[in-house]
Image (cartoon, rainbow, N blue to C red):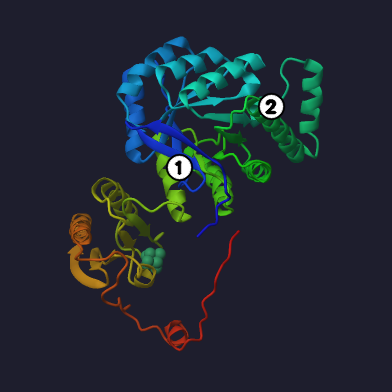
């Protein structure tokens, strides 16, 4: 179990959407953002509903223009997940979004004209009981108006101490913004401080978590295409979460937002921060022993499981019987391929030996049957009934079993703080 740092709690949503808690003892929530125009109501609603179906707890929409905030009432009518209005530059958009009934505002006080305008948003949120995310991005903290100041700041950024200098500016900005909210006696906030650099994200959030007890919204901004953006995000957010830091997350990259939700949830499952919903798929990477088209099979199994299985069954798809049985031993359902065939096991019991073109169908049928058995109480997840015996005996050098049974292997407790 990861010991999470204690933060205050904020609430958003209502009876219709369900109330999402962020911070305190609440589970880490997953959020994402629509990519299309908010004023295109049908498209925006479809995006929000797709994200909610994929497991998003919260969805953010951009409201750069009046036509976007005008669309919000209808969007809120047609969706059932808390909506956050993302506001930059125009404080009126925040007031209009609040009036339309959104559940939270995202504000960067650094790009709102003056303090009175920020105060107007704070007061409107207080009146409606709405929280505000106070965010700084690395890209928006450098002086824009005063050219000399900008030159000096940029000069420092390209010096050897860029990393530390950026952290210092981001922390100073966050402190400055929080002062505005606290001076108004408004504490219903969460904080974000995003950068494109994962190491900076790790360091700046670590520092913020030492200074404030407001809940933290974690994210890497402009992380790039999905292939590399996922890695950037998971390196930064995974490190912070493993250290107990972070209350809500957004993975972001240049791809369909629904993948951000899937990847965010998978990260939380892997860290044990959320109970898994749906099947967990493990698969071998294949090697020179492979005798079936495993990559295609794995992708087909993945898609089918995502749609058809809701119980957290562990499913293993293995290329052969050499290491497959050992690696899949903890799986509820496993297939070991070989010689253009697949041998299927359910909790260690061999139930089928089918040709390659029947593996997918039979494996899914066994998953469905097993899911029904779990639901009816006839089977228990993670319980192995029969040992899977590999074809070649593991010699005394290969197996740790003798050592475990003789009590020579001591349990190791790993402590995290
Ligand atoms: S399970 Fe078999 S095919 Fe897959 S990587 Fe291991 S040895 Fe290779």
Determine the image quadrant of residue 47. Answer: top left
Image check: 225 left or right of 382? right
Return the x and y of residue 211 as percentages of the image width and height: 68, 42
The residue at the point 66 percent across, 17 percent down is: 115
Residue bearing mark 1: 29
Check disc 1 and report its element: helix, strand or loop. strand
Taking depth in this image into account, of 365 and 414 the one nearest to the observer is: 414
The residue at the point 60 percent across, 58 percent down is: 417
Disc 1 and disc 2: Cα gap in Å? 27 Å
Residue bearing mark 2: 141
The residue at the point 40 percent across, 32 percent down is: 13
Return the x and y of residue 171 as percentages of the image width and height: 70, 35
Q: Quick one: label 2, few (<14), some, or many (20+) residues within 10 Å? A: some
Res 256 visible: no
Return the x and y of residue 238 as percentages of the image width and height: 54, 50
Ligand 1 is located in which of the four quadrants?
bottom left
């Amino acid at each position: 179990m990861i010991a999470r740092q204690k933060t205050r709690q904020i609430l958003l949503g209502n009876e219709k959407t369900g109330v999402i808690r962020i911070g305190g003892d609440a589970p880490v929530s997953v959020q994402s953002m629509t990519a299309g125009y908010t004023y295109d109501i049908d498209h925006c609603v479809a995006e929000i509903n797709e994200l909610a179906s994929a497991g998003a707890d919260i969805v953010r929409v951009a409201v750069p223009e009046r036509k976007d905030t005008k669309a919000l009432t209808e969007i809120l009518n047609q969706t059932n997940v808390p909506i956050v209005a993302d506001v930059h530059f125009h404080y009126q958009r925040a007031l209009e979004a609040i009036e339309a009934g959104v559940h939270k505002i995202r504000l960067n006080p650094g790009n709102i004209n003056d303090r009175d305008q920020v105060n107007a948003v704070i007061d409107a949120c207080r009146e409606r009981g709405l929280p505000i995310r106070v965010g700084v991005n690395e890209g928006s903290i450098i002086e824009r108006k005063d050219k000399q100041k900008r030159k000096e700041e940029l000069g420092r950024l390209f010096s050897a101490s860029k990393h530390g200098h950026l952290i210092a500016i981001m922390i100073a900005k966050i402190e400055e913004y929080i002062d505005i909210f606290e001076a108004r006696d408004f504490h219903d906030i969460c904080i974000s401080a995003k950068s494109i650099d994962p190491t900076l994200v790790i360091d700046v959030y670590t520092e913020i978590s030492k200074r404030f007890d407001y809940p933290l919204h974690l994210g890497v901004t402009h992380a790039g295409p999905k292939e590399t953006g996922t890695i950037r995000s998971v390196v930064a957010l995974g490190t912070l979460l493993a250290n107990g830091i972070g209350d809500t997350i957004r993975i972001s990259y240049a791809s369909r937002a629904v993948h951000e939700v899937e990847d965010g949830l998978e990260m939380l499952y892997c860290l044990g921060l959320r109970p898994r919903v749906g099947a967990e798929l493990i698969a071998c990477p294949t090697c020179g022993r492979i005798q079936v088209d495993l990559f295609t099979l794995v992708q087909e199994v993945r898609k089918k499981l995502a749609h058809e299985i809701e119980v957290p069954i562990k499913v293993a798809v293995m290329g052969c019987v050499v290491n497959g049985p050992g690696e899949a031993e903890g799986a509820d359902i496993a297939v070991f391929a070989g010689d253009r065939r697949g041998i299927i096991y359910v909790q260690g019991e061999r139930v089928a030996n089918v040709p390659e073109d029947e593996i997918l169908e039979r494996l899914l049928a066994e998953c469905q049957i097993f899911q029904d058995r779990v639901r009816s109480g006839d089977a228990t997840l993670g319980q192995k009934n029969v040992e899977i015996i590999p074809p070649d005996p593991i010699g005394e050098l290969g197996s740790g079993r003798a050592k475990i049974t003789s009590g020579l292997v001591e349990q190791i407790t790993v402590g995290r703080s």
